[in-house]
Amino acid sequence: MAGNTALPRLVATAMAALVGALNQIIDRIERALNVLEAHPLAGMAIVTQTIGAAADTRVYHGLGRAALGYFIVRCSADVRVCDGLVSEAIDPANYVSLRASSAQTVTLAVF
């Protein structure tokens, strides 16, 4: 009869060790994901819009926070894009004001 109780205890011990190991793996994965989520490029919006040269263009990014920056992913011609003068009130949590060297359609990564 002693052999009958040893097996369930062995299985229970092995299961507890397995659960402990899995919990450690989950904790490490969560810590790694938290580091990645904290990176500015993790919350990036890809936006395609025509940006004018004569006046500021409000570009909707929808990040829910002020943009840290942007870079051009694709453009239809040689163009320089810079911050606009913000001549009108914009919601920085959702928009960025930009101006281009010439009116062009650009795809931006806003982060």
Image (tube, rainbow, N blue to C red):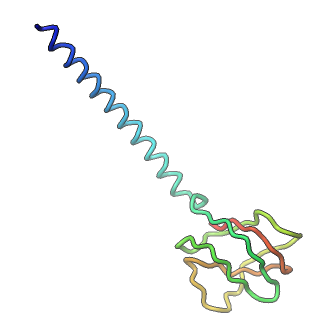
Q: Is residue 70 above or below residue 37?
A: below
Instruction: Judge left or right: residue 3 versus residue 42.
Output: left
Residue lying furthest bottom: 88
Q: Is 98 on the left or on the right of 42, as rendered?
A: right
Residue depicted at 58% across the width and 61% down the height: 40
Please give the name of the residue rendered at 35% of the width and 37% of the height, measured from the top-left corner.
23
Q: How many marks?
A: 0
**Image position, residue 67 (x, y; %):** 60, 72
Question: Residue 43: horizontal and vertical position, in percent?
Answer: 57, 62
Image position, residue 24 (x, y; %): 37, 36
Q: Residue furthest left?
A: 1
Q: Position of residue 81 (x, y in %)?
A: 78, 75
| Point 67% across, 87% down: residue | 86
Question: Which quarter of the rendering shows the N terminus?
Answer: top left
Q: Quadrant of the C terminus?
A: bottom right
Quarter of the image where one finds residue 89: bottom right
* 100 w.r.t. 47: above or below: below
Q: Would you place residue 68 above or below residue 88 in this image?
A: above
Q: What residue is at 47 percent from the left and 52 percent from the top?
A: 34
In this picture, residue 56 sits left or right of residue 104: left
Q: Quadrant of residue 91?
A: bottom right
Q: As drawn, is 18 to the left or to the right of 40?
A: left
